[in-house]
Structure formats: C-alpha cells, structure tokens
Amino acid sequence: MNIVIVGATGNVGRKTLEVLEKKELSIDNLYLVASSKSAGKKMTFKGKELEVSDLESFDFSKVKIAFFAAGGKISEKFALKAAKDCFVIDNSSFFRMDPDVPLIVPQVNPNHLNNIKKNIIANPNCSTAQLVIVLKPLHDLFKIKRVVVSTYQSVSGGGKAPMDELIEQTKSILQGKNVVSKNFTKQIAFNAIPHIDVFSDDGYTKEELKMTNETKKILDNKIDLTATCVRLPITVSHSESVNLEFEKHFSLEEVREALNNFEGCKVIDERKDGGYSTPLEAEGKEETFISRIRVDKSIKNGLNLWIVSDNLLRGAALNAIEIAETLIKNNYYGK
C-alpha cells in the first residue's frame, strides 16, 4: 500500500503524518508533497527522513490513497486529476456537498462509502465531525428533531498562521505594544470573534452553514440545525454547546450509556468543580468528550450537552485515516 499526503507541511498534514505513525496501516511507501516553496524540506516518519516533493510534478499513479490536506483551491485543481489513479480523501470543503462525493465519519455513516462515484471521499468540517459522532447514537435512540449549537473554536482551525498570530498578539499585549490583526477581522488575543469564514446574504457565516448542511448530509436531512460559530484565543480543540430536541422521551441514564458505548465518545460528566472536559484536556486525545449533560426544562424532550474535541486530530487527520482504514478493511480500494 502506497500513500501520499498532499499538504504535508501544514497543520493537518503534519497531524496526519503523526497519526499514521501510530496506526497499524501496512504502508509500503509514504510520499509527502506540498507546494514548490516547501519542496525539498525533510520530515521524519517512523525514524526515516522523507523529503517533501513538489505537488505540481507528483505522479499519483504510484499510490492507492491520497490524503489531501492543503485547502480547497489545491483540491479543486488536483483532486480530480489524482482520483483517476487513486482514492482521494479530501479534508477541504470543496467536494463536501457534491452529491457524487460521500461525506464520511466512519462511526456514523460508513454505508455511504457504497456511493463512491469519483474516487473522492470528503472529510467533514472539524466542528461537524465532532458533533455528528455525538448525535448519531442519540438520534438512533430518540430521533433528533432540532439542534441548536454554539461553537467555541480554536485558532488552529484557520491554519498555522492564525496560531502564530495569536501568540504574537498575546506577547504584544502583555508587553504593552499595539496589536495589528492580519488573519482575523478583529484582535483575537483576550477576545472572542463571532465570525468564522465569510458571511452569506442571510447573515450566517459559511462555517455555520457548513455545520447545517454537512450534518444533514451525513446523518439525516430531516434534522433542523442552527449554529453560531465563534473563534476563541485557544490554540487547539473546539468546544460546542449543544441543545437537542428529541421526538421521543429519554432519561439521562440512557443518554450517558449510549454515548459511553459509542466508538469515539467519552462521557466526563460529574456535577462538581472540574467534573467536565475543556479544550486543554482534549488536545492530543482521539475521543470526543461529552460533559454538562442535563435536561432542558424549557422544551419537551430537550437536552443540553457540552462537547470538546481536538479539531486537528478528531476533526481532520484521525477521521481521514479512519476513512482509509474503512476502505481497506472493506476492500473498497480494490473495486
């Protein structure tokens, strides 16, 4: 099995390399590619030094699976070309709503892999990925009618440059210097920005619409969902405050049991100081953590949850690799 990571030097690319090192995929040759400015750089995989190649000249016929982790413009330009020779697992938003491209979270909708038509599988938005893995077991039991979600997202969701800027701004403020925002619409250090991605005509941002549309495609088109997405001065991990309305009656015991027994979920819900998960504890962990589980007394069959997950890991690299594992396990790549 030969594999390539496109965008290997970026946040998600480096995390993909890190996760692959821990996984037991049988890899004969691993190729790392990126833009021409990164070509020639050296990266380490399982004790071996690998040189980054130029994407423009890479031959995709050498690989079975290509992880694309370089953004929508690169996927638009190269993914279809690559898909003529291999399976593409794309982390960008470019193909997510394409009806001929399955949008996959393996724990939630692996059956959608039966609908591969272009040899491309899309990875959902990181905030969607951690949400649907929690919604799935609850939807199966109690049938979700409506979701209201507010996200509190780390700057790493925007890439390495926003992470560097948060650190630079924080240092500047602590030193009494003026702050100039480059990657954000306003100062991010010691602040909260209720704006991720561009605005649509109806006032929602693209990030909020991604959560709505992707959840429907992955889980159930009949679910109503509304989102507010906020960027916080946190380096890694996204948090979500989630309000659910079910069709059926539930008990908190049933909710906790269903979540704890679902792959990828872990309940940390003690009603005491510190009895919940935060972004710091989620960083570097594969699970999506669920806390603050309580009945919403304002509506019938209502539930409130707090969800935290490492966006670079669970929301991007790990999900992409689990897609690859599912392809291999079910021999999709041989079809």
Image (tube, rainbow, N blue to C red):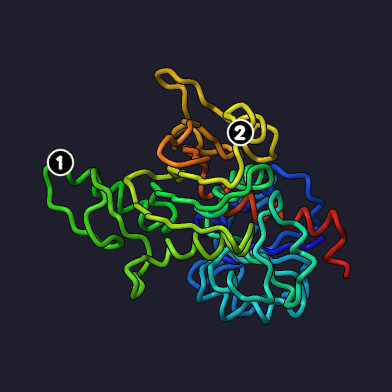
Left or right: where 171 falls relative to 246: left
Q: Is residue 32 visible?
A: no
Quarter of the image with the C terminus in it: bottom right
Give percent across and percent down for residue 283.
Answer: 50, 38
Q: Nearer the viewer, residue 295 or 14?
A: 295
Q: Residue at 36% of width from left, 43% of height from top?
A: 234
The label on residue 210 is none
Q: Which residue is mark 1?
A: 175
- In the figure, 62 relative to 91: above or below? below
Q: Hey, what amino acid is under mark 1?
A: Gln
Q: Hey, what amino acid is under mark 2?
A: Val
Q: Nearer the viewer, residue 168 or 293?
A: 293
Give percent across and percent down for residue 138.
Answer: 63, 42
Between the residue at mark 2 and the residue at mark 1, the CA separation in whole angstroms equals: 48 Å
Q: Residue at 56% of width from left, 63% of height from top?
A: 214
Q: Residue furthest top?
A: 272
Q: Residue at 35% of width from left, 69% of height from top?
A: 198
**Mark closest to the chain's N terminus, 2 or 1:** 1
Name the secondary structure under disc 1: loop
Within 10 angstroms of label 2, few (less than 14), some, or many (20 or more) residues? some
Label count reads: 2
Q: Nearer the viewer, residue 76 or 32?
A: 76
Q: Which residue is mark 2?
A: 255
Give percent across and percent down for residue 115.
Answer: 76, 70
Left or right: where 56 falls relative to 26: left
Q: Nearer the viewer, mark 2 or mark 1?
A: 2
Give percent across and percent down for residue 33.
Answer: 61, 67
Q: Is residue 281 visible?
A: yes
Q: Residue furthest front?
A: 300
Quarter of the image with the N terminus in it: bottom right
